[in-house]
Image (cartoon, helix red, strand yellow):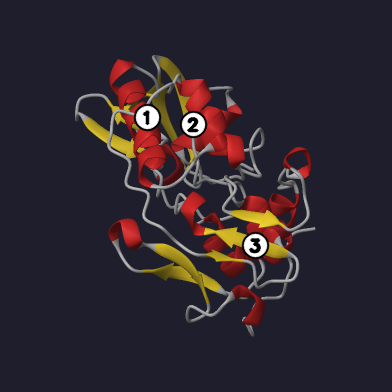
Amino acid sequence: MMTPGTAVKTFTMDGKPFSATEEETILDVARENGIDIPTLCHLEGILPTGQCRLCMVEIQGSGRLVPACATKPEEGMDIITDNPRLRNYRKMIVELLFSERNHICAVCVSNGHCELQSVAQRLGVNHVRFAYLHPRFMLDGSHPKYEVDHNRCILCGRCVRVCEEIEGAHTRDLRNRGIRTMVITDFDTPWGESPTCTGCGKCVHVCPTGALAEKGKSVAEMAKRRHFLPYLAMRRRGGK
């Protein structure tokens, strides 16, 4: 909400004039105006990190690509949200995600409800140009209600952030580097033995893939529910 005294930046995006407050990001303005920029790590209600790099946009005159979810417009900025260069980078990012871990949709519990699958379809990714890596991770089914398959994780960090920022538990974090990076529970404790997990399931419902899932749900039932997130984020900030 714009209040008296709020500084406003004016800029162009895809050749059209726009304005934004100091709190708004390029992605905020784009979504408010119906401009589609794909994302996988971003969710309204938790802090943006630009981890997936899928929302990269181009800043004219500098040649720079910046993540729209974590970049605020500057006065006079000329932003391009879609061109062949950006489409090529976005397709490459999605292909690299598919090549790194096991995302065989036909045998995934989130088939049909997976954001990675949806983005790939939107971007026209119909093959992968890179060698498959597929490091093998163990499944953790120790929790009574949920399970985690690290082989389907894209390391977007949504589960880590919602657990810390919304639930306040900070049960989850990252371990290792490179292709061995994985989301762990506490100090790499089996999920079902975690002393800090509240069992709220928020991490499951913000996961964009089938990495986190509810036990006993069929493929058709495994639709994630995220409508609660902006509301809970507002309540934590003291809003009503």
x and y percentages locating residue 198 in the rendered image: 71, 75
Q: Secondary structure at mark 1?
A: helix
Q: Please, what is the three-letter code of the amino acid marked with disc 1?
A: Arg
Q: Which residue is painted at 59% across and 51% down in the image?
A: 207
Looking at the image, can residue 153 be seen? no
Is disc 3 in contact with disc 1, using a CB cutoff of under 8 Å?
no
Residue type at numbered disc 2:
Pro
Which of marks 1 and 2 precedes in the sequence? Answer: 2
For the residue pair 110 and 62, the one nearer the viewer reads as 110
Say which quarter of the image contains residue 146. bottom right
Q: Which residue is mark 2?
A: 38
Q: Say left or right for 69 vs 56.
A: right
Asked if the residue at tag 2 contacts the one at tag 3, i.e. Cβ–Cβ closer than 8 Å, the answer is: no
Image quarter (top left, top right, bottom left or bottom right) of the C terminus: bottom right
In this view of the protein, can residue 133 be seen by the observer?
A: yes
- Local packing at callout 3 (Cα closer than 10 Å; few below 14, some 14-19, many 20+) is many
Q: In 3D space, how far apart are the residues under numbered discs 3 and 1 (Cα atoms)?
A: 30 Å
Q: Nearer the viewer, mark 3 or mark 2?
A: 3
**Nearest to the observer: residue 158 or residue 112:** 112
